[in-house]
Amino acid sequence: MASVAAPTAMVVCPHHLASTAGLNLLSQGGNAVDAAIATQAALAVVYPAMTGLGGDGFWLGYQAGQLYGLNGSGQAGAGCDRDRFTSLGVAAVPQRGPQAVITVPGGVSAWGEVHQRFGRLPWADLLVPAIALAEGGYPCSNSQSRWTGANAEFLRAYGGEHNPLLPGGEVPTAGAKVTNLPLGTTLRRLASEGWQDFYRGQIAGQMVSYLEGLGGWLTRDDFARHRASWVEPIDTTYRGYRVCQLPPNSQGFTVLQMLNVLEGFNLHTVGHGTADYYHLLVEATKLAFADRDRWLGDPDFTNLPLAELISKPYGDRRRARLSMAVAQGYPALALGGDTVYIAVVDGEGNAVSTIQSLYFDFGAAVVPPDLGFALQNRGALFTLDPGHPNALEPGKRPFHTLMPALVLKDGRPYLVLGTMGGEGQPQTQLALLTRMLDFGYSPQAAIDLPRWLWGRTWGEASTRLAMENRIPADIRQALERRGHQVAEAPAWAEPMGHAHAIQVNANGLLGGCDRRSDGAIACL
């Protein structure tokens, strides 16, 4: 039997139609950046609960020998300050509605910036697949139907009588053909006028006008001031690999801290899937999260000791606080986590690790009906405590859960990986990294193995250790005896995130796609 050549180009994301859209751009001569933008745009159509033009995005990539980072998170508007909220008698930024929309959506600016610098195909070509899906229709997924039903009340309240995400005013059923003609029109305008129209043109005006009608606070000037920021990736070494993340306001540095702690342990001796394995990774997570919650904010507004936090000596000191016998305590807070992650590798060896999100499902649920997309509620992550690094201030970017990852071997991409899931993102990345780098699992096997989630996510305050019931009961009981508040979760529980990965080998590419999503691996 003739051998089948391994793929040399690949797109992985949480919806199969979007993976196909990205692959089509690769087949037309586009590079990894072109394919990633096309995939993001298609996801904005077919995965509207998790992502869209109204959200933020982060990019970590490798292009022609150059490692780069791009922060596409938006700043709080000039009129969005703590006093304005306290005058309303509220103790926190609302999670839904117009006052939740206090940061400019930055994802489209990231598309534009990365395309200007690295894209190969014309800008308009990248949006063609998404326009076709919006205008020609696609089958509604179980996920879209379920999340739309869960948010129908908010969508009706803040999306107008003709909200295109509620066709005919109803929740679309799984399998039904759905279109989003207003979103198609918006994408056509972006294609013809350029991405800047989103911030300084007609689209910006439509967003601001709709928000003003609901009592929102963002202005045309807030949109016009926004720029995505090129940033220097941060990294640490682990078992001879270079693991790269984005700097704050992303929480990516937490994984680097966890790896520095774990490097002092022989995981082969610990054993994969043992009580010691889970305990060790959870305790390393708690140590990193304590630093994150103490320090993380917009680095333009706060002095975060990043170099120290990700240093090996600091990892040694943190490791000394870890007990293998007893679980540490931790305060309970709440975060959300609806996001999409995309991994792309093209035939030239360029790689993109990118993640975009509305924060909660459908974000603030504010949907300008003539535009066809929801606006994010990422500003709900700000605190109104003036002494905290993440305190709300005009022009400031909030603490961000988004964190794409890239692993280099001998200076070139080896693993492209990430996941949705808010608080679960660092934990799932840690699971994938140890499984692939320490134990040699393939990307698909590493994703398929049972997962866990410690603490808070998806808006639920908790210090529980949720573990899928595929993890044996005796392991869970052993962890309870160490003081973990173990809660059994269903097999393939969606709160564990939608993880995706691509591994680059000498003979080609290996992909992994999370069955918790509607995704697929598309390859050439």
Image (tube, rainbow, N blue to C red):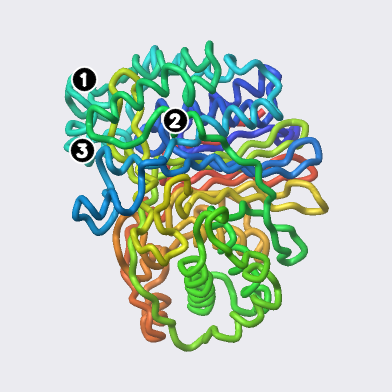
* Mark 3 residue element: helix
Q: Can you identify the residue that label 3 sits on?
A: 154
Residue 102 point in image, percent of width and height: 36, 42
First in residue order: circle 2 vs circle 3: 3
Asked whether the viewer can see residue 520, the reply is yes
Number of the label disc, if any, that sits on residue 221: 2
Residue 151 point in image, percent of width and height: 23, 39
- In the image, what residue type sits under mark 2? Asp
Asked whether the viewer can see residue 510, the reply is no
Residue 365: quarter of image: top left
Residue 103 point in image, percent of width and height: 41, 41
Please give the name of the residue rendered at 81% of the width and 50% of the height, measured from the top-left corner: 411
* Mark 2 residue element: helix
The one of 280 and 163 positioned closer to us in this rendering = 163
Please give the name of the residue rendered at 44% of the width and 36% of the height, measured from the top-left corner: 105
Q: CA distance from mark 1 to mark 2?
A: 28 Å
Q: Can you identify the residue that label 1 sits on?
A: 162
The one of 2 and 123 positioned closer to us in this rendering = 123
Q: Residues within 10 Å of mark 1 (few under 14, many from 20)?
A: some
First in residue order: circle 1 vs circle 2: 1
Split into 4 quadrants, where in the image is the C terminus? top right
Q: Residues within 10 Å of mark 2 (few under 14, many from 20)?
A: some
